[in-house]
Amino acid sequence: MRQRPIMTATLLALVATFMLAGCSNDMSDLEGFIAETNARPGGRIEPLPEIKEHEPFAYEAFDLRSPFVPERAQRKGPAGGGLRPDSARPREFLEQFPLDTLDMVGTLSKDGQLYGLVQTSDTLVHRVTVGNYVGQSDGKIILIDDSEIQVVEIIPDGIGGYMERPATISLGEQ
């Protein structure tokens, strides 16, 4: 066990000797570079650009609406009126899936009624018709044709109310 500290000390001394051997007092290459740099002619320094006087701006739109205040008053709660999702309506199966994960895979006509065929992310195909709800934003199907299903979603408008947003589920290329 005593040999290990002796070997470690010997190894450290050897490494220190090699490191010190790399240091020398010969700086002739550095002195030559400095002499060459000092021998070059000095360059011309460009003058600083002229600083233009700042022109102050006088704000004169005090009678206009502030851009930091919403255009319409915020509506909160049921007393606010206007468009709202129907929270008492029973939820349909396809409302648990985000609208962008639903794919239209075709249509089906039965007894004069046109149905849309919608495939969910779990690869199951569901039959929908106008008036059904899909997606997680109260999306109501308003039109079904051969190439797409048109939906109107009710989404928050960011100031306490709600607004309608059109969306489509297009026929995917399989």
Image (spheres, grey):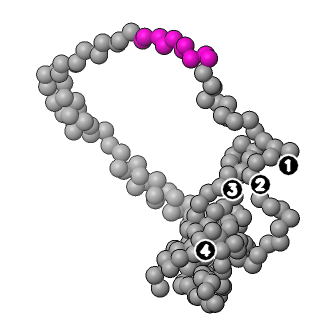
- Residue hosting label 3: 155
61 on left or right of 21: right
Three-letter residue code for mark 1: Pro
Quarter of the N terminus within the rendering: bottom right
Q: What residue is rendered at 20% in x and 34% in y?
A: 33
Q: Residue 156, percent across and down?
A: 70, 52
Three-letter residue code for mark 3: Ile
Instruction: Report, in whole angstroms, how far the alpha carbon at label 1 lies from the one at label 4.
Output: 31 Å
- Residue hosting label 1: 78
Instruction: Report, in whole angstroms, how far the alpha carbon at label 1 lies from the one at label 3.
Output: 16 Å
- Residue hosting label 2: 84
Q: Residue 153, percent across and down?
A: 66, 61
Instruction: Report, in whole angstroms, how far the alpha carbon at label 4 lies from the one at label 3.
Output: 18 Å
Residue 164 vertical position relative to residue 75 in the rendered view, above or below: below
Instruction: Report, in whole angstroms, how far the alpha carbon at label 2 lies from the one at label 4.
Output: 24 Å
Instruction: Report, in whole angstroms, how far the alpha carbon at label 2 lies from the one at label 1.
Output: 8 Å
- Residue hosting label 4: 101
Please identify the residue farthest to the bottom as the structure is shown: 110
Circle 2 SS class: loop
